[in-house]
Image: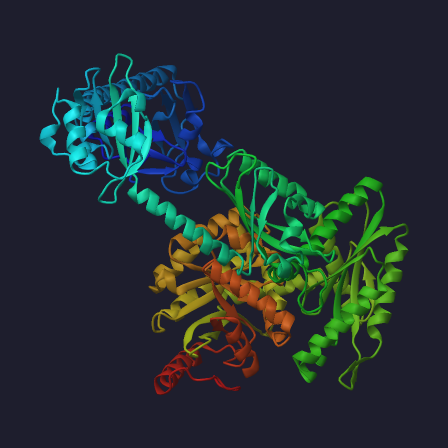
Amino acid sequence: MSQPAPDPELDAVCRTAAALFGVRYAFVSQLDGACQWFLGREGLILPGTQREIAFCAHTIRGEAHAPLIVLDTRRDRRFAANPLVTGAPFLRFYAGVSIALGDGRHAGTVCIADTVPRTGFSAAQVRRLSDLALFVEATLRGRAAESEACQARHRAEASDTLLRTTLERMDQGLLMTDAADRIRIFNRRVATLIGVPEELLYDGAPFAAVRAHQAATGEFAHLPDALRAWLEYGAPEARIYDYERVRPDGTVLQVRTLPLPRGGLVRTFTDMTARRAAESALRASEGRYRLLAENANDVIVLGDIAMRCLYVSPAVRTVLGYEPEDLIGTTAAEFCHPDDAADLTEHWSQLKAGREGRFVTCLRHRHKAGHYVWIEASVRVLPDAQAEDRITYVATLRDVSARREAEERVRHMALHDALTGLPNRTLFRDRLDQAIAHARRVRTGFAVLACDLDRFKAVNDSLGHPAGDALLRIVAERMRAALRPYDTIARLGGDEFAIVLTYLDDAREAACLAERLIAAVSEPIDLDGQSVEVGVSIGLTVATEQDCDPDELFKRADIALYEAKAAGRNTHREFEPDAGARIATRGLLALDMKEAIRRDAFHLAYQPVVDAATGTVVGFEALMRWRHPVQGDLAPGAFIPLAEETGLIVPLGAWALQEACREAAGWPAPIRVAVNVSAVQLRRPGLEATVLSALAASGLPANRLKLEVTESMLMQDAEAVLACLHRLRGRGVRIALDDFGTGYSSLSYLRRFPFDQIKIDRSFIRDIADPDAAAIVRAVVGIGERLGMGIVAEGVETPEQLDLVRREGCTQVQGFLFSRPLPPREASAYIAARADRAGASRGPRVAAGQG
């Protein structure tokens, strides 16, 4: 149903109910499949709510007139987390009675509610509420009965008019004669169709006069003798009930005659001129269609109800290697890959049953050479084509092998690290969950290893990122080779790796494998003639069937890793419960962080995001910085994880939002500021209020603030996170998916949440000169374009990378090619300089070192 119009009578009832029960809210509602609409209301502003959060959706599940009483919504599991409880209108008490509307369905309610919980609701109050519901129900039913009576009167009047006008509105001509061959019923259309003046047609007119007039004007001159005898003289022995003739003016007239039980005839005259012309055009069209089908790149198949091919276009030679005649009489099931057969059968069954008139599916079809080709099949049932020997369906077959390969690469990217090909954090977590489940079943041990490379940063800084990437690939391959085939090694990011060692008969095996890993990594590595050496620090924890928390296991391995680093690196340590030194150090850093937050010792730097085509500044990403009084400048990776672990990220993130919005308010519109949001901020209540407070305090429009979330956040309490993001986006705040492809698989979340932007991680941009990496970037851009999401390429450092990301369709870029992160004043100067440069030269190319 649509939004109801205001109803003063029901509003008055609601006002009375609110006063009678001493509540803030009273309403009469009706529910449809998606919404709850308020027919009358007191205290409520909105005309309705979504059905999925409506209290009344629970009320109508009971019997009619049976009340639902909720004395305190926060103590009721069904409603404690309901947005109507946690947010406006803050319902704490609810009482509702279902009512049967005019159609007999329990789709209406009479309710009262308040922002204060109650300790009780007496039987007398229940009776008063039920009586009020009966009154409202009677009122609504009375209205429905009155409306139905009015409609009945209108239908009766319309029926009389219809009977009077039907004959004259008929496209056909109609003429009825009685047993004496006199006209009794006719319409004006018949005079035009048979070519006689209207004065010859009247009640009781002899039909012989009509035939005589037609014969005199030459209507029957060129007809066969038998038909002419019937039409000119009405000879009963020559009577022809159905025939088609061409009038002298070219009109094709179809005449059908029906004898009446008491004598007489009813004749209908239909102008078939347009239809016959259309049939002729159709025959010509069929010829053109065959010409098109035989020259199209896609394979076109026509088949019968048994799925047998009756026609196959010549394109099958190119796509599948067969001659068209090879497939006549065969079915798709004979050539379908076994893994796709069930899907094909299900689609075809639904199509035959009439549940769908068309389906599109991807399946593997056997090529004549023996291999399988990915085919996108679009199959449509033709109307009224159910006979065994006639064409029932038309199918278009398209070779989509290249597209499937690109999609597989995107799926692989979602579960694997783009640089090393190792599993990423998502797949690692899945394998760890599997190891825990297996250990429970067979009561065996397994181990979790956390690994960090030693001296990697020095190599990366001195030889450059390409050398660092090559080093990571070599180390990843060495570590994989040192492990057993059934172990899992994953790259978590940077130079961090994690390993699950399964099927451990002896706990000492984990230490032996750790030593093998250290020895393998420590071997010298040749990087384009430059010999380098790195090491690896490993923290491990051996788990048993009692261990069931994957986060706790990895935390133990991480603690052991810190112990290994403290022991001089390039070694391994097993987790010890009393490893308190590292924890104490982290505790001191946490105390320093609290003090730094109190003293406003943090500051933000702003890295520009520019338009890939013009170089114009479109926004800045706000990046957190901390100068520790003792340790000096700390990288975000050194304090952000600790802030998240201790919860300090909440006040720190709130400060960052306030500061970024305040600074951005001074930039020219429409330049946006992007702020990274932590998973801890999303999981805890209050983020929406923090964002709105920052916007209100700064005066920055909501559409100039962009929140960046990473893929990993979406895996943690995904429904609540997505709901929070939806609410923020509904207020105008833009949402971007950051570091796409480096962590958890976000493909399903791209469908479930309409992100404004996707930020492709810098690891893909570094490899974009590689055709495979470029194809992956192109696939991501294509996904973003189809879903209406902008694409930002991170980590653009060279003009060559800029040219390539432009070519692949990235609309915005960010990286050292344009600028390092800037203090606030330099960010404002950067905007002005870019604006001057854009005014001096439209569409400039960006050279290395600019910005």
| Residue farthest along the left direction in this orientation | 199
Q: Position of residue 226 (x, y in %)?
A: 31, 30
Q: Residue, x 56% and y 52% (percent of image)?
A: 748
Left or right relative to 155: residue 50: right
Q: Where is residue 590 in the image (x, y as percent from the top left)?
A: 61, 62
Left or right relative to 252: residue 307: right
Q: Position of residue 180 (x, y in %)?
A: 19, 16
Camera-side residue of 163 and 601: 163
Q: Position of residue 5 (x, y in %)?
A: 24, 35
Camera-side residue of 26 and 105: 105
Left or right relative to 493: residue 23: left
Residue 202: name its quadrant.
top left
Residue 184: name its quadrant.
top left
Tell me the quadrant of the picture where the N terminus can be found.
top left
Q: Residue, x 38% and y 86% (percent of image)?
A: 841
Is residue 414 visible in the rendered image? The answer is: no
Question: In this figure, what is the number of numbered marks?
Answer: 0
Residue 86: name its quadrant.
top left
